[in-house]
């Protein structure tokens, strides 16, 4: 079937697919392009098996395969030798560079060591020369005087809570004790809504007064918040001053307040305010208030006329615990300027309006801009009803102007410069009974 002579070796360019029938008769063929693969030796070996359709020659001699393998191995060996030579050359270059860098570094260290040694020897020589000279006179530096003690012996500090029912003069008493106005006051009850701290600094003590909202039977969620804030102030105080109006007999609310005070561990003082209003029932009222005790001390005062304050302060200092100041000696209150300004505007609302209008008002500072020669303050006064909005604005804005004019002098006193007040009135329906509105307006507890 094959010829005696081996087939001629030709390079393989195409692949032929043959199609035979069941009698092995050729039915057709398809020529495919030969893929590019392998090395040249492999192509040469495959080319030997390409045959013609009528080729009967025997398969080629496989010696060519061995020759191709040998050529391929020789080629790989040559590549390996070249790679080894390149790698050795690269390593030699790196070693040479490293040696040069190391030598340069050692030379630099040697030079530095020599310089340090020379400097040290020069210093020793100078020191030796100094010993040969006569000693200089010893000058003793002056001993600084010890700093003055921040807390004199016997210094006391602590919290004094002013508690009582509404409108007995707690805020007026606080302002009188401090010698300046930090709390707003008005003849209307429930003026104080949040506990306010006023700080009195003395040579022998620092007294932190806590003016609390009047304790009453609340009718709104705001009222409940105010009462709760007052109740919380009692256990935290070192001394509790139960402030009463000596011109009026104790009522059921004051009996409950006295019970709260008696349960605390604080020292308890009964402060009989408004003694300047002498009434025939004064003595009987005194006996009734004493019966709500026991009290560590009874002190009669007139906050409006600043009577009896020296005695009250003396009794308070004696009952405070020893300790350092709790606030800087130049701080008078824990209330910010913005909060104080809002309260001063609300004070004027309490002054000029009646019935439910003043109690349904909240004031918020929207903008405070300090300028070189003035301060611009924009505030919003919130009311609960549209009718209250009209009352606050007044005809042609007259009521709003009166409120701004009344608050401006006090605001200028705390800001230290002329103040421009931009007042607006908005309605926030039934905000006193809306928990989210109360929180939004700042009436929220500590937990």
Image (spheres, helix red, strand yellow):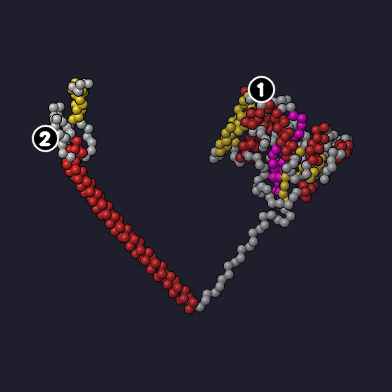
Residue at the limit of the structure toward the left, as seen here: 5
In the picture shown, does residue 103 fall above or below 186? below
Q: Residues within 10 Å of mark 1 (few under 14, many from 20)?
A: some
- Residue 263 seen from this side: yes
Residue lying at 65% horizontally and 37% vertically, measured from the top left? 340
Which segment is the magenta one? 195-218
Q: Residues within 10 Å of mark 2 (few under 14, many from 20)?
A: few
Residue lying at 36% horizontally and 66% vertically, measured from the top left? 111
Q: Which mark is residue 4?
A: 2
Residue annotated with mark 1: 385
Residue lying at 81% horizontally and 37% vertically, measured from the top left? 259
Residue lying at 63% horizontally and 39% vertically, measured from the top left? 336
Q: Secondary structure at mark 1?
A: loop
x and y percent of residue 250 in the render?
83, 34
Indicate which label's residue lies in the foreground, 1 or 2.
Answer: 2
Report whether 397 appears left or right of 323.
left
Inspect the magenta stretch and tell me whether residue 198 lies in it: yes
Q: Which mark is residue 212?
A: none
In the picture shown, does residue 230 fall above or below 219? below
Q: Secondary structure at mark 2?
A: loop
Inspect the magenta stretch and tell me whether residue 366 lies in it: no
In what quadrant of the picture does the N terminus appear? top left
x and y percent of residue 17 in the render?
21, 26
x and y percent of residue 173 in the render?
75, 40
x and y percent of residue 282 in the render?
86, 37
Given residues 87 and 285, the one toward you in this image is 87
Which is nearer the N-term, disc 1 or disc 2? 2
Image quadrant where residue 230 sits: top right
In what quadrant of the picture does the C terminus appear? top right
């Amino acid at each position: 079937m094959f010829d005696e002579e081996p087939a001629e070796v030709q390079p393989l360019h195409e692949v032929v697919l043959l199609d035979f029938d069941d009698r092995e008769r050729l039915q057709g063929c398809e020529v495919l392009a030969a893929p590019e693969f392998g090395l040249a030796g492999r192509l040469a070996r495959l080319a030997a098996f390409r045959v013609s359709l009528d080729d009967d020659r025997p398969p080629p001699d496989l010696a060519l395969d061995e020759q191709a393998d040998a050529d391929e191995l020789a080629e790989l060996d040559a590549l390996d030798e070249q790679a080894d030579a390149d790698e050795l050359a690269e390593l030699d270059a790196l070693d040479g560079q490293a040696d040069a860098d190391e030598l340069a570094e050692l030379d630099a260290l040697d030079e530095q060591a020599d310089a340090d040694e020379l400097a040290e020897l020069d210093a020793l020589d100078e020191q030796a020369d100094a010993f040969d000279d006569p000693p200089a006179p010893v000058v003793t530096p002056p001993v600084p005087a010890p700093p003055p003690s921040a807390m004199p012996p016997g210094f006391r500090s602590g919290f004094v809570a002013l508690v009582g029912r509404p409108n007995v003069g707690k805020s007026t008493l606080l302002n009188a004790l401090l010698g300046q106005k930090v709390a707003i006051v008005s003849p209307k009850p429930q003026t104080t809504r949040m506990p306010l701290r006023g700080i009195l600094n003395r040579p022998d003590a620092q007294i932190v007064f806590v003016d609390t909202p009047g304790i009453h039977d609340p009718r709104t969620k705001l009222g409940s918040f105010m009462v709760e804030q007052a109740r919380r102030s009692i256990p935290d105080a070192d001394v509790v001053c139960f402030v009463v109006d000596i011109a009026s007999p104790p009522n059921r609310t004051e009996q409950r307040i006295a019970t709260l005070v008696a349960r605390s561990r604080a020292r308890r003082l009964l402060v009989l305010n408004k003694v300047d209003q002498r009434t025939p029932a004064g003595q009987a009222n005194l006996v009734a208030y004493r019966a709500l005790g026991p009290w560590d001390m009874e002190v009669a005062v007139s906050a409006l006329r600043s009577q009896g304050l020296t005695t009250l302060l003396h009794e308070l200092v004696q009952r405070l615990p020893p300790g350092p100041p709790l606030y800087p000696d130049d701080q008078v209150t824990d209330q910010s300027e913005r909060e104080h300004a809002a309260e001063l505007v609300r004070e004027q609302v309490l002054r000029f309006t009646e019935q439910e209008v003043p109690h349904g008002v909240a004031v918020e500072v929207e903008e405070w801009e300090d300028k070189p020669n003035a301060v611009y303050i924009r505030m919003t006064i919130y009311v609960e009803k549209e009718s209250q909005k009209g009352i606050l604005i007044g005809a042609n804005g007259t009521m709003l102007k009166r409120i701004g004019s009344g608050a401006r002098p006090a605001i200028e006193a705390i800001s230290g410069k002329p103040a421009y007040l931009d007042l607006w009135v908005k309605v926030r329906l039934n905000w006193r009974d809306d928990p989210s509105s109360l929180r939004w307006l700042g009436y929220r507890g500590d937990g």
